[in-house]
Image (cartoon, helix red, strand yellow):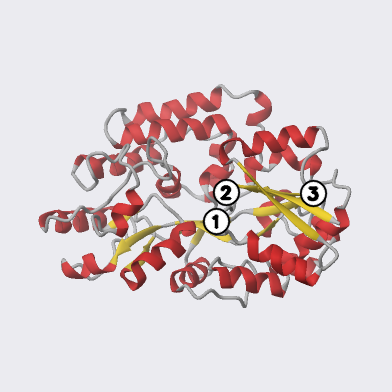
Amino acid sequence: MTLTLWLDGDCSKGDCVEKPLIEGFEKANPSIKVNLVSQPVSSYFQALQSASVTGKGPDIANMWPGGYMTPFLPYMADLSQFMSRDIIKQSSSTKFYAKDNDPGKQVYAVPTGDQWYVGFYNKKLFAQNGISATPKTWDDLNATCTTLKGKGVLPIVNGGEYGAAEMGPLPEWSYIASTLSPDDWSKLYDGSLKYNNPALQSQLQAWADLYKNGCLNKDALNSPDPESQFIAGKAAMFFASGSWEVKNLYEKMGDNVGLLVPPYSPQPQHALSETAGSAYSVMKYSKHEAEAGKFAAYILSDEGQQIIAKFGLPPTRPGFTTAIPMMNELIKMSSAPGTTLYPMFDDYTQPGVTDAITSKIPQVLVGQLGVSDGLSAIDAAFDALPAKQKDVHVNLTSK
């Protein structure tokens, strides 16, 4: 028999973890084949919604947490019936796919890895220019920028990634918002705390001042492929990214690249934005639900975790490490004493709010829009939501 698995993205070059996972699963289950179907990223969730309504979607569906997953809850099987609760609770990120973020309740998807918003720095450029410590605060970052500019080095590069016309602010926005507690993030999500508040005003102004003071490239709004510029040594820091680029950066730059949590904080930064990465759900309308459940269980099995680690992604169960030092460092940072873990901010925002952040916040950075105007635009986007979309209950608590 054959299962159909939908992937949110292109795997034609084989550069995705799904390939080795499927190969390992089929070897362990010779009577089951898995047909991997790549779907366009831009229309993936719309296509999955349409297919699910008619009961003609895949047996196994690529899923993302938070607001991405909510519309599909009626169609997803509880995966706890296919694996032990102990294995589920061992997984650091399965909670993001569980009811009420509680892995002891229904589990709607299992992740193929953890994921972080994080920045990077060029160790060689830092050393060559006499910078011995990475910045931990806004003041540190401005001082580092001053030193690098004085040496003729571009401190930070930004721009449109992956063919986008403009920069994507969501990774950096998570750290701008980390001046608020996780509990206050919950209030932003349900509207009980306005975005246009003094704490976010101060943070956003500090971010915009970086551009005003020449710490970023002049075309930061729409410079093509900033990551390639960072890899080529044309800039010392790159913040608009995440752990999905660790493998590529390490392969291209080796030990010259290091992790740098965006130091967007008046006090030493102890925040880290972590959420489950891509995951897989078993759809209730599948005619082969039990077999699809075996694939979900395989992801969290010892063998599945080893495959994920070998591929270079961070497994979600303890005891499995990758061959990439930076990835193991991220895992260690997540459990370090004093670290406050936040999710990726946009995993829980409503689409209209996410659109407002994506479109308005870059304009604030480059001075095309004032700080209060930008934050007010996000509040306006929330106010315009249907009442049902405002009724969100995200229980985030400080670590």
Q: Which residue is mark 2?
A: 10
Vertical relation: 361 (above or below) 91: above
Question: Where is 170 relative to 22, above or below?
Answer: above
Q: In the drawing, what numbered circle is on residue 13?
A: 1
Evaluate if marks 2 and 1 touch, with contact meaning CB atoms under 8 Å apart.
yes
Nearer to us of marks 2 and 3 is 2
Q: Report the amino acid beneath label 1.
A: Lys
Residue type at mark 3? Asp
Q: Give neighbour class at mark 3: few <14, some 14-19, many 20+ (Cα, 10 Å).
A: many
Q: CA distance from mark 2 to mark 3?
A: 19 Å
Q: How many marks?
A: 3
Work out whether mark 1 precedes mark 3 in sequence or the reverse, and give the earlier one.
Answer: 1
| 285, 316: nearer the viewer | 285
At label 2, the amino acid type is: Asp
Return the disc, 2 or 3, that comes first in the chain's sequence: 2
Q: Is residue 194 above or below residue 69?
A: above
Q: Provide the residue designation for mark 3.
A: 59
43 and 359: which one is in front? 43
Question: Which of the two discs, 2 and 1, sits closer to the camera?
Answer: 1
Q: Position of residue 349 (x, y in %)?
A: 56, 38
